[in-house]
Amino acid sequence: MEQEKDIAKAPSLDYETGKSSFLDEDAMKLAEMGYTQDMKRNFSVWSVLGVGFSLTNSWFGISAAMITGINSGGPLLIIYGIILIALISTCVGISLSELASALPNAGGQYFWANELAPKRYANFASYLTGWFAWTGSIFTSASVALAMGSALVGCWQLGHPDFVIKPWHVFVAYQITNIFCFFFNCYGKTLPKVATFTLWISLVSFFVLLVAVPASAPTHQHAKFVFATFINNTGWSQNGIAFIVGLVNTNWAFACLDCATHMAEEVHKPERMIPIAIMGTVAIGFVTSWFFSISMFFSIVGDFSDIAGTSTLVPILELFYRAFSENTAGAIFAEILIILTGYGCLIASHTWQSRLCWSFARDRGLPGHQWLSKVHPTLGVPVVAHFVSCAWVAAVGCLYLGSYTAFNSMVTACIVLLYVSYAIPVVCLLIKGRDNIQHGPFWLGPIGLFSNIVLLAWTLFTIIMYSFPYAKPVLASNMNYVSAVYGVVITLMTTDWVVRGRKSYRGQESRHAEVEDVVRRESVG
């Protein structure tokens, strides 16, 4: 106990100079974990919720993946799939919230794994988790950038019917979108306001579309189509497999729930605020996505196959166009609301991936960690980590030019990799014993244990079932290449671990030893 008190007296430690400064209680807790207070705590619970929800943004995710999901299960898949995924996401959110409350740190799941795993395996478990989480965030940003690039090009095509969309058109729009959103994460003081603004943009856009689209549609689908129609265009003879194959699209709309955990060092009292942001994201996500889906399905006008095969390559835009009685301006305005929401999503995704990169680099988990771990003293953000992460997103976009199916497999991989990154610290927690760690304010006991089990079971389910081919017969053009994506990620990670990581990675023992050493030198001085 005396040692813990001594450590708490040195909340902010500079390991290069050996100097310490006395800050607030949040910084003291951070110092006990072995970290300095490098980021300013500029975020409120609303702005953290803004980042978390803007990234997950379930109703936007449904709008981007709606038609793909329909081909693998129809409206029935989307309507009931949202309920299923929301229930699972509640368990995921509870599991993350408990750990974020007990161990609030920007490292999130990789930090938890290091603290909870048996000492012999702690560094490797943490390193594995960090790589899965960061690559998952890169793939997520790429998927959002592609959705925005497709939407922009689709709007142009709708206004110019003779224009034929080619892959390079979408690729250019993808890169422009990625670069544009990059700049919003370059200044720390304005980022909380941007996050709050994008939260309200999303909610206002949702409400406008929820009301305007069905109100304008000249005809409406019947309730049986919306709530009881199953469509199987996958080629799978078993409807159950078709449902599961399509479920990945609904799952994408509830991915990235760990985002708020990586803002733990930028908000006061993170042990309370982060769980609020996570559970709030799940709740708002379910309400908005479910009602949005019902509203859009009732508003489908004409033959569904024509909407799915639109020349804009953006089915939701074609749905708007028909619902507004083929009014081009009205459809484009509705899609602009989607695009603005998507930009907010990508800005939040950039925030997320940069914080993951920066925090992981602090513990030397990535090559070039000496640069990636720096926070710009004036801008107040990890600029190098942000730039490198966005550069990887730009590079991943090149995959779209080669094969859309391969790119789509990467989207599937991002979901599974993130679940695995959540599962590793939960496994470590169960091995250590849920009652053998100091609980935070958010701790649900038996409900938390049940949530942990659901998370682990669902992770195993996704690893297996989301690897199935998207359609049959299986061809190079429709193959699920997710296993190849796993192989590339694991190869890169293993190579770095063998060459560099196993020697230089800073685990729990090293962090605490550094803290104790600085405290000892301070007390002697």
Image (spheres, helix red, strand yellow):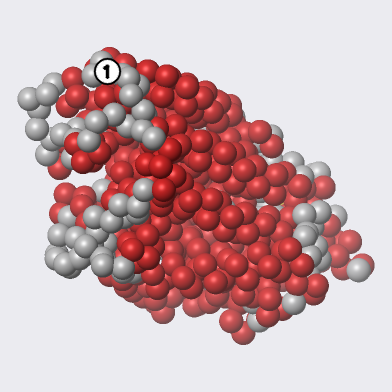
Whole-percent x, y for residue 43 in the image: 66, 35
Identify the secondary structure beneath mark 1: loop
Q: Is residue 153 above or below residue 246?
A: above
Residue in the image at 64% along x and 75% along y: 428
**Label 1 Cα neighbours within 10 Å, binned few <14 / some 14-19 / many ≥20:** some
Q: Position of residue 352 (x, y in %)?
A: 51, 47
The image shows residue 432 at horizontal and vertical percentages of 72, 78
- Which quadrant does the N terminus fall into? bottom right
Q: Which residue is mark 1?
A: 325
Outermost residue to the right: 2
Q: Is residue 515 above or below residue 173?
A: below
Residue at 72% across, 47% down: 270
Whether residue 180 appears in this view of the structure is: no
Which kind of residue does numbered mark 1 sit on?
Answer: Ser
Q: Is residue 225 visible in the rendered structure shown here?
A: yes
Q: Position of residue 228 (x, y in %)?
A: 41, 48
In this rendering, the answer to whether 18 lies above or below 438 is above
Quadrant holding the C terminus:
bottom right
Residue at the (15%, 60%) spot, across then down:
477
| Residue shown at the point (48%, 73%) measured from the top left | 460
The number of numbered discs placed on residues in the rendered structure image is 1
Judged left or right of residue 67, residue 252 is: right
Left/right placement of residue 259 relative to residue 277 reads: left
Q: Nearer the viewer, residue 156 or 248?
A: 248
Left or right, 40 with respect to 476, comes to: right
